Image (cartoon, grey):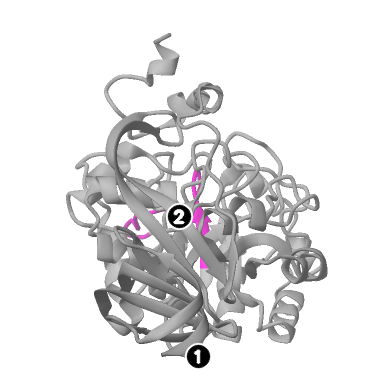
C-alpha cells in the first residue's frame, strides 16, 4: 500500500460537484486531494477516523466581513471561520477601490483561510460605515464616492481575489434614499463591464421589491442580471420578499429566480427571520448560497458561525445534500471559482471539512431573538486547509442571552414576525 500524508477514513463523503455520496475515504498528499473512494488502498502518516461523520469539501462562507481593524465590522477569518470548518471566505464589500490594497496585504496574504471578496461600489467600502438598520449615515451618502471607473479598474487588476461587486441598498446609508437608484445602477454597470456577479444588500430600502404598473424605477431583485446574488433573503424589514397582503413570496422575486438570480442567506445581525424563512420553506424557496454575513456585531450571536446557520436551514427542512451544495459547489460556481474550490476533485488543494450531525435539543435565535428548538446540529470535528489540519473551536454560549436582549430591540421594525414578541422582551 502507498504511504501518503493523510487519510480520512470511513465517513459519509458528500461532494456535490462530483456527485459523490458514499461511505468512503479521502486521501491527501502534498497539500492536494490525492483520491476519494470506498476502501482506498493507501496508508496515511495521519489516519483520521471519520466514522459517523460527514466529510465534505472545505466549507465556503459566501458572505463575511473580515477586514479586521480597518472596518468596524471586521473579524479574524482564521479564528472565527477556519476554526469552525470554513476554508474559504468571501468578504462582501468591506473594501472599495481605494481601500482594497489593505484587505489583500494585511488580511488575505496573512490568513490561513482563503480570502476572496466582492469589491464595494463605494471607493472607501465600509471603512466608516456600520450596519444599515436605524444607523443614519453610510458609505453611499455622496455619489462622488461611487466611481465606476476606479471600481472596474481595481477589479480587473485583481481578478485572482475579487470575484464581484457589492452594493448596499438601504435608505439610511444612501442620503435618505435619494442615492439608492444610482448606487444600484452603478454597481450593476461594473458587474456588466467586468462580467462578474453583483451582490446586492436590499433591506429597509426605497428600491421596490415588487414592481408596479407605470413605475419606471429599478426594482430589486427584478432588475438584477442572471448570476447576480441577492443577499439577506429571509429578512423581515421593509423590502422583505414576502407580500404582506398574501403572505406569499412576491411574484417579481419568483421571476428573478426563474431567470437566474441567485439567493443567499446573509443571516447577519438583522437579516434572518424564522417567520420569513418558514414562509419560504413552505414553497421550498431555499437559498442557492448559505452565507453568514459574519461580523463583529453577530459573531457571538445570533450568527455564531457557518455551521450554526447551516443548522437553521436543516431545521427548516432544506435537504442535507442541498445544504452541503449551498456551502460548497454552488458558492464556488457563483463566484467563478468552480474549477478551483468547493469539491474534492483530485489535484485540487486539499480543503476538507469533517462534521457530525448531532441529535440535540436546543433553542436557536434569529436576528431579532425569536427562537426555535432545533433537534439536529452541525458540529465541526476537523478541518484541513491545503492539506494542513487546523484546530477546531466552539462558540462559548448558545444562545447568548446578552446578544438576544440587544438584538430584540429591532422587533418593532419588523413587518413579518411571530404573533408574540421574543421571550427576552417578555421578561422570561
Residue under numbered circle 1: 347
Residue under numbered circle 2: 381
Name the residue at 55% across, 82% down: 349
SS of the residue under disc 2: strand
The answer to whether residue 160 of the structure is visible from this angle is: yes
**45 to 79, vertically: above or below:** below
Name the residue at 75% across, 63% down: 107
Give left or right: position of 383 versus 244: right
Name the residue at 37% across, 34% down: 415
Magenta span contains residue 417 = no
For label 1, the crowd category at 10 Å Cα-Cα, with few meaning under 14, some 14 to 19 and many 20 or more, is some
SS of the residue under disc 1: loop
Q: Which residues are magenta?
A: 199-214
Residue 249 position in % (x across, y down): 25, 51
Name the residue at 59% across, 55% down: 391
Which quadrant is home to the C terminus? top left
The answer to whether residue 217 of the structure is visible from this angle is: no
Magenta span contains residue 203 = yes
> Disc 2 or 1, which lies upstream in sequence?
1
Give left or right: position of 347 versus 233: right
Give left or right: position of 408 versus 321: right
**8 to 240, vertically: above or below:** below
Main secondary-structure element of the magenta-colored stretch: loop
Residue 364 position in % (x across, y down): 38, 34
Give 130 or 52, whichever is nearer the viewer. 52
Residue 224 position in % (x across, y down): 44, 70
Amino acid at each position: 500500500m502507498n504511504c501518503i500524508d493523510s487519510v480520512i477514513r470511513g465517513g459519509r463523503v458528500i461532494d456535490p460537484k462530483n456527485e459523490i455520496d458514499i461511505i468512503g475515504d479521502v486521501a491527501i498528499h502534498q497539500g492536494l486531494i490525492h483520491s476519494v473512494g470506498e476502501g482506498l488502498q493507501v496508508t496515511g502518516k495521519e489516519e483520521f477516523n471519520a466514522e459517523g461523520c460527514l466529510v465534505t469539501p472545505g466549507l465556503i462562507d459566501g458572505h463575511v466581513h473580515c477586514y479586521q481593524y480597518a472596518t468596524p465590522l471586521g473579524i479574524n477569518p482564521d479564528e472565527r471561520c477556519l476554526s469552525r470548518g470554513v476554508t474559504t471566505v468571501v468578504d462582501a464589500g468591506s473594501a472599495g477601490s481605494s481601500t482594497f490594497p489593505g484587505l489583500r496585504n494585511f488580511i488575505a496574504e496573512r490568513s490561513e483561510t482563503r480570502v476572496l471578496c466582492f469589491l464595494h461600489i463605494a471607493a472607501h467600502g465600509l471603512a466608516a460605515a456600520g450596519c444599515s438598520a436605524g444607523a443614519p449615515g453610510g458609505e453611499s451618502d455622496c455619489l462622488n464616492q461611487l466611481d465606476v471607473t476606479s471600481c472596474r479598474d481595481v477589479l480587473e487588476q485583481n481578478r485572482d481575489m475579487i470575484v464581484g461587486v457589492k452594493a448596499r441598498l438601504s435608505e439610511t446609508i444612501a442620503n435618505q434614499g435619494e442615492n439608492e437608484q444610482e448606487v444600484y445602477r452603478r454597481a450593476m454597470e461594473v458587474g456588466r463591464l467586468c462580467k462578474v456577479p453583483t451582490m446586492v444588500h436590499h433591506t429597509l430600502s426605497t428600491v421596490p421589491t415588487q414592481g408596479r404598473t407605470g413605475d419606471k424605477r429599478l426594482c430589486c431583485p427584478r432588475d438584477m442580471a442572471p448570476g447576480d446574488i441577492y443577499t439577506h433573503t429571509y429578512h423581515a424589514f421593509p423590502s422583505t420578499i414576502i407580500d404582506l397582503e398574501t403572505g406569499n413570496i412576491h411574484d417579481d422575486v419568483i421571476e428573478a429566480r426563474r431567470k437566474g438570480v441567485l439567493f443567499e442567506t446573509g443571516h447577519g445581525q438583522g437579516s434572518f427571520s424564522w417567520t420569513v424563512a418558514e414562509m419560504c420553506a413552505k414553497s421550498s424557496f431555499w437559498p442557492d448560497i448559505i452565507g453568514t454575513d459574519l461580523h463583529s456585531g453577530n459573531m457571538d450571536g445570533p450568527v455564531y458561525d457557518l455551521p450554526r446557520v447551516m443548522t437553521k436551514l436543516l431545521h427548516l427542512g432544506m435537504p442535507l445534500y442541498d445544504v452541503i451544495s449551498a456551502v460548497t459547489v454552488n458558492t464556488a460556481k457563483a463566484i467563478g471559482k468552480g474549477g478551483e474550490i468547493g469539491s474534492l476533485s483530485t489535484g485540487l488543494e486539499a480543503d476538507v471539512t469533517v462534521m457530525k450531525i448531532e441529535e440535540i435539543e436546543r433553542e436557536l435565535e434569529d436576528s431579532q431573538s425569536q427562537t426555535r428548538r432545533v433537534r439536529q446540529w452541525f458540529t465541526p470535528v476537523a478541518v484541513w486547509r491545503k492539506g494542513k489540519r487546523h484546530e477546531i473551536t466552539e462558540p462559548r454560549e448558545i444562545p447568548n442571552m446578552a446578544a438576544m436582549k440587544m438584538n430584540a430591540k429591532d422587533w418593532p421594525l419588523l413587518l413579518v414576525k411571530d404573533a408574540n414578541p421574543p421571550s427576552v422582551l417578555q421578561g422570561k
